Amino acid sequence: MAYLHVDHVSKTYPGVKALDDIVLEIEMGKVHTLAGENGAGKSTLVKILTGTERPTEGRVMIDDQDAVHHQHLHKSIAYVPQEINLFGNMTVAENLFMPFSRSHHGGLLFRRRKLERAAQPWIERFKIAARPGDKVRNISISDQQLLQIARACTNESMKILILDEPTSSLTETEVERVFRVVRDVVASGCGVVFISHKFDEMFAISDTISVLRNGRLIDTQPATMLDDRQLISLMSGQEIKTDARLQPEGSEGEVILQVDGLSGKGFEDVSFNLRRGEILGFAGLVGAGRSEVMQTLFGFLPARAGSARVEGREWRLGDTHHAIRNGLFYLSEERKYHGIFPGQSVRRNIGMPLFGSTARGGVIDARRERERVGTIVRDYDIKTPTLNQNITFLSGGNQQKAIIGRAMACDPRVLIFDEPTKGIDLRTKMEIYRLMKALAERGVGIILVSSEMDELRRCANRIITMYEGRISGEFHIEQASGNALVGAIHGHGGDGHAA
Amino acid sequence: MLRKAMGFMVSNPLSGVISVLAIIVVVASLMSENFLNSYNLVIIARALAFIGIITIAQSMLMILGELDLSLGAIGGFCGVIGGILMVRVGLDPWLAFALCLVIGALFGLINGLLVTLLRLPSLVLTIGMAGVYGGLNLVITKGVAITGIPADIGFLGSGKWFGLPVPFWVMLVFLALACFITLKTPFGRYMYAVGSNLPAAQMLGIRTDRVRIGVFAFAGFLAALAGMLMVARLGSAQPSIGDSWVLGPIAASVIGGVPTTGGIGTPLGAIFGAAIIGVIENIIVLLGVSPYWQSMVSGAIVVIAISLDSISRRYFRRD
Amino acid sequence: MLRKAMGFMVSNPLSGVISVLAIIVVVASLMSENFLNSYNLVIIARALAFIGIITIAQSMLMILGELDLSLGAIGGFCGVIGGILMVRVGLDPWLAFALCLVIGALFGLINGLLVTLLRLPSLVLTIGMAGVYGGLNLVITKGVAITGIPADIGFLGSGKWFGLPVPFWVMLVFLALACFITLKTPFGRYMYAVGSNLPAAQMLGIRTDRVRIGVFAFAGFLAALAGMLMVARLGSAQPSIGDSWVLGPIAASVIGGVPTTGGIGTPLGAIFGAAIIGVIENIIVLLGVSPYWQSMVSGAIVVIAISLDSISRRYFRRD
Amino acid sequence: TGAQAADGPGTEKADSYRFVVVPKVVHPWFDKVNQGAQQAATAIQAQTGSEVEIQYSAPQSASVAEQNEIIERAIATRPDGIIVDLLDPSGNRTVLEEAQEQGIPITLFDSINPEGMSLTTIGSDFCEQAEMAANRLIELLDGEGQVAIMMGVPTAPNHAERARCAQAVFDAHEGIEVVATGVDNDDINTAQQQASAIMQANPDLDGWVASDAAGPVGIGQAIKEADKVGKVQLVGLDDLNQMLVLIKDGVADSSSASRPTMQGYWSVINMWQQATGAIPPGHIDTGNVMITPDNIDTFMQ
Ligand SMILES: Nc1ncnc2c1ncn2[C@@H]1O[C@H](COP(=O)(O)OP(=O)(O)OP(=O)(O)O)[C@@H](O)[C@H]1O
Ligand SMILES: Nc1ncnc2c1ncn2[C@@H]1O[C@H](COP(=O)(O)OP(=O)(O)OP(=O)(O)O)[C@@H](O)[C@H]1O
Ligand SMILES: [Mg+2]
Ligand SMILES: [Mg+2]
């Protein structure tokens, strides 16, 4: 008997039918995966299950009772949201157990020591690289992600655990850690709802897979009955080729970016070259310092030492305006904090760096702006009812597409992608890969920072590995299949210098 | 049906504040036959002119997510400086006027530099700077007004043009300019970007410091303008000019749809907010409400106005 | 070496403000031999007591990311209500005192309810509510002080205990209570959670509304306490009590490490901030600084204090 | 001559009059002015049968701009006369001229005419009031000692004038030395803190005068708290009820008070006289009084 029952649920937002007559059963002791493209309605469904949103029509039955009338039932549903939602100024232990009454640390007094002692086993179980007393804003994003999952699991009345894209900022090792926990949870008799855009993960963990498309439930199948191709066509309604290698041709152009001995926050003595027309991959464990290198190069973080040259000319560090004006664009992995302008329309969000072509004599030409933004929205297939929609209400993946479209529209000469496909569905991923390839072949130098080995192997001409703030190896793509690359990422062996 | 109509209305972010203003005007004209009389409308327009200029300045800062509590002090201080330049130094009044606007912009610039370069919270910084500018004002004037402002510029304060006070026209011009800047120029878009997500704006290569400093300077300029117009109006440079320009414009901006958290709203909305407060203060006096009740009534109005706004937004979701 | 020592020092978030206070005290005692004299310290302690109680209240609200600009008005109004209850109604002074604290908490509660239920921005709401409470105060008193407060409670305002003024002890007790609440109870941790990330706190099932309403009510209680202590001290219920309790405590809190954006800092730090302002205002008068310079000097001090804090934090990163 | 007298100055009669009283700011002192105005209204009504309405309209803060707005709004209601205490003659001037253009008569109280205008002024001399207090203090100290002056709001002209006049009196006396000046911004609490610190810095201080009504109340509290009652003399200003209590308790010696009720009374009488067509006087002096323990009971309510 299903513990959780979604009974003809629909959800309408102004201008969007996010969910359309969904019927679904979540069973205990099983992992139920929700698959679907960006904006299919996965997060919306999950929010209705957790009670953060109310359905426009239909009901959610928990334990055979209508959850709208019995709000307390939602307590048995633990939830890890898609976006990181922690208290940056508070400690790991506090974040783990808040609210304290739920985790038996309530009472009159708040006992820091006791709480931190209680946090230790959780930290170990999830292998979070932090002490219980560390402030959350000082720990890495991946640790924050793990902490969120750990926090959900501390809910003792948990019957269902919902994970909305928990793995989007994790590397394979860390994903394995999450999976171990998921298996534990399932073994203890709870049900798990899992969302991801990565197929291997879905097949590795799921018992059942439900596919959503444009707010409608397309199919629910046991995982063993599906394969990649079927799943893709269910999700997108069309055939998509996924196995193509997408390295740009003609990556032997002249050096466009040369970095010498760059040092900054969290990394030391980083030197490398980027050629015109190539995609240079940066591999490493999360926290290896790749983002910091790129942000320093871009001018967002201060450099301590070192220099860079772009097209042979000395590069000014520490000035993002200069960087963008001179064709170096950086796309942050943190969409929420570094990407979108919440509360502003899609048009304003995308139009922000385009005034070079949409403003004349210091005045914005509304018509031209609408045209340009409209083109970008169409080209990147950004799902939004109108250009004036508040970007906050777009699904996570569509926000990401908007940001990528915006960057590409700026005609960069060097483009740094930091985890560009985080949270992006497969079809769009392929589009982004193809776009990267096309850009590179038009003579743009591209740096691709990614935690997905598959992505790097598929797209990059060359891969540089980083370990604890230093470059630990460099590989041509032909050599990148072996163990040496993985070794270099983990900081041992792999002195496979080839370039 | 009604719900739908209302829903449509509130889909324009300004319709809420405009309808509140309209209702208040109708009620006011029913309550006092003096209200719609042309002299009274001129009075309202004139009062709105001064507070309105400050409201424009404050709302632009609030779009950035900043506040400047020293705008009143800047206005008063610049007025006094202008008085000194005209009366004691004997400078040409027009030159002195222009010079004061530059000085005001400079004071605003100082606030902006401190906020951006030292990364100070503008609320507290400008509490301090209000003490500094207001204190310097006292030091220079010893609290005594500077009289004998040349009549040449009196026109700017007391004159009329097409039946409306000159300061009101000045306010309208700068309102138009502010709306143009915020809505039609890249700079304005950058303002919203900064107010909505500062790090993201930096990531797009927007010179966020310049944007913020620029708006602070413009706000200082506007404060000095209001101060100088008031000097022209009074015919004397009162050290206390601007003392009451601190909280009202902030409340007006919020009523008009510019939250203190930044990123949304327009100076136009803020001016409607200021008009609501202005009309209410006018009608209170016209009706002969006891002075003891006035502060309570205007406080309650602010509370009611923002509550209505919040409630209406909750029921007719406006995005 | 020095850098390291300094770095260590600033790793404790309070050491910055404590060192600034220490430096100021040392300089002050070198500049005036009267400064460290016991009577003067009593004066400072007494002044700090009243503004300190409000600072505790304001800093707790600021940890939540809220502000209450009506605390001064609540203090003044509750003082007047207390005076009326004692003098006109003839209630037992202690009972009246207690009743006023309850009324103050009620006013705070009203602010809290409006902020949370109607989702109003507290800055503007409380600008309005300051008008309401202050206005009611005027309506009731017509600006005339209520004299003849029974001498029984005079001790609370003017008495001493172990050489220090009673209000100062009261302030210390509530400071300890506030620190206990914020640092040692789950409720206090929820305060930081709310200030640090409100949506996240809501999602976790923390009753964020209750937390915020609770702190608003406590702040109202403290404001009433300060008001009643002032009534006890003056022996009369002055309607203008609290007028000068608005901006100082906010500045003090920021100086003491509680930003207006919420989520960090402690009431203890805020009290040190208030002490800095208090000592400076005292030494200015002791040194016979011209009255015209005083507002400029105290404004400049606020600016310098927050600038030093920001600079030191930039150089010795404190997390 | 009888017919001639009937058309002469002061013979017009109306059934009702409405006068607006605009003080500097909402403050108890002006309530007394209002009381006096109401008394005069009742008196006129009793004597002539004409209805007299007094409308009291006060700025919420002491700012010229705000006061101008209040006067403008008063003009908009077209009253039979406006009675004003000017915050700043030069700053108020434009509005007063506007009122005259609209044919609305004006009487000033507690303030002086703006340059070039000749409206009736009613009130007493601030300078005289401050001099009375200063002289009383000198008397108390037998012409010898250290004194301090508490300023009110530095931007308020009457406060500034009182401080100046008191200073001048002290300067004229050999034995008297002004050792400190405080500033209280018309706030009792600030006055108390300033007075405490000043007495601390000047342990030999012998006496105080103040230039606003809140000042002496705060100074009195500070004297009590410093245990210096009797050792430090205080001559207060005006007649706030706390001031009277201080005198009763012996903390303050006396207070130099203007007479607000009288000012209100004569302002209305003058306004009414003008409305009847009588020629207004240039100035009516309502005088100051010294409140001492001997006559205090007549001031207590
Ligand atoms: N608050 C909202 N207001 C308006 N539209 C919304 C809101 N929340 C979601 N939507 C819309 O509902 C649709 C479904 O969004 P949802 O976030 O559920 O997608 P998703 O399947 O989780 O996608 P992703 O994989 O990108 O996270 C999208 O078109 C989105 O724009
Ligand atoms: N204290 C912080 N404040 C703001 N941003 C931070 C902070 N710590 C980390 N970040 C940002 O979080 C992102 C991820 O950091 P994290 O430490 O997880 O990985 P990383 O150092 O970027 O390593 P890699 O990119 O190799 O995975 C980066 O964009 C980094 O700038
Ligand atoms: Mg989603
Ligand atoms: Mg990274």
Image: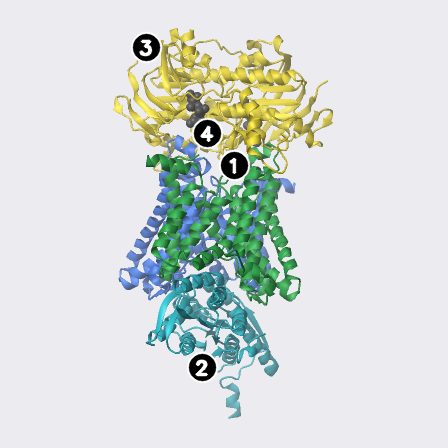
Chain colours: A yellow, B blue, C green, D cyan
**Position in image of residue D137 (x %, y %):** 42, 75
In which quadrant is the C terminus of chain A drawn?
Answer: top left
Q: In the visual, does B178 lie left or right of A133?
A: left
Q: Which residue is mark 3?
A: A499
Residues at discs 2 and 1 both on one chain: no
- Tag 3: Cα neighbours inside 10 Å, few (<14), some, or many (≥20)? few
Q: Secondary structure at mark 3?
A: loop
Q: Amino acid at mark 1?
A: Ser
- Mark-to-mark CA distance, 3 and 1: 47 Å
The circle drawn on residue D281 is: 2
Closer mark to the observer between disc 4 and disc 3: 4
Disc 4: residue Cβ within 8 A of ligand 2's nearest atom: yes
Work out whether residue B214 or residue D226 is closer to the camera in this orientation and state it: D226
**In the displayed structure, would residue C142 be above or below residue A370?**
below
Q: Amino acid at mark 2?
A: Pro
Residues at discs 4 and 2 both on one chain: no
Q: Which residue is mark 4?
A: A138
Q: Which residue is mark 1?
A: C196
Closer mark to the observer between disc 3 and disc 2: 3
Q: Would you say the residues marked 3 and 1 are in contact, meaning their CB atoms lie under 8 Å apart?
A: no
Q: Chain of mark 1?
A: C
- Tag 1: Cα neighbours inside 10 Å, few (<14), some, or many (≥20)? many
- Mark-to-mark CA distance, 1 and 4: 14 Å
**Position in image of residue D58 (x %, y %):** 51, 65
Q: Would you say the residues marked 2 and 1 are in contact, meaning their CB atoms lie under 8 Å apart?
A: no
Q: Secondary structure at mark 1?
A: helix
Residue C216 visible? The answer is yes
Q: In the visual, does B125 lie left or right of B279?
A: left
